[in-house]
Amino acid sequence: MWKTLFSVFVLSVVLIASAQAGYDRNQAVPVEKVLYGQVESVRDITQQQLVEDKNSGWRTFGGALLGGVIGNQFGSGHGRDVTTVLGAIVGAGIGNNSGRGSYYRQTQLIELMIRQEDNTQVMIIQDKDPGMLFNPGDEVRVVYLKGSVRVDKAM
């Protein structure tokens, strides 16, 4: 019986650990290069993104634990082991399906066509910042980071 409960616990921990992302939005990264340029065109874009509930792993774990405890109350011998495992499986399923908090989030983006100082053209899509509106003809700074790029107004 303890082996079964331990197995359910280990499986739940693995599922929870795999659901967490290793991305930090406020991470500082080194700048690879900076070029200046002029905005040639600006276009607003709206993007819809499905946002998954990040607490579903805890609900699954809690459901499995509670289901295992309830299932352990029934049967005897190997029958008790079977009802414990079935209770954990059913509890995990119920816990995972309860309170699904998925929803769609709209993100406002801006698409910028920029002619850089080395006469190359680049198209960059980034989050729209209401405090920094771009218009054709604006002088901008294009900051190339490792794996990404950011545009702001040249000072």
Image (cartoon, helix red, strand yellow):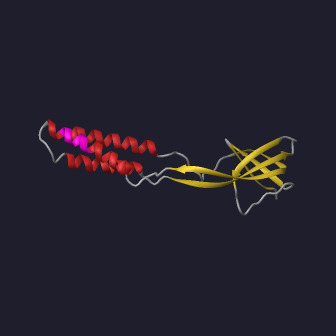
Give whichever of 101, 118 is nearer the camera: 101
Please indicate whether residue 70 sits to the left or right of residue 153 in the image: left
Q: Residue furthest left?
A: 76
Q: Residue furthest top?
A: 78
Give whichever of 57, 103 is nearer the camera: 103
Q: Which residue occupies 26% across, 51% down?
A: 66
Please indicate whether residue 52 sits to the left or right of residue 71 in the image: right
Q: Residue furthest bottom?
A: 131
Quadrant (top left, top right, bottom left, bottom right) of the N terminus: top left
Q: Which residue occupies 15% across, 38% down?
A: 79
Q: Which residues are the magenta region? A: 81-87
Let me know if residue 63 is in the magenta part: no
User: Residue 17: x percent and y percent?
Assistant: 42, 44
Q: Which residue occupies 83% across, 42% down?
A: 121
Residue 1 in sight here: no
Q: Quadrant of residue 5?
A: top left
Let me know if residue 82 is in the magenta part: yes
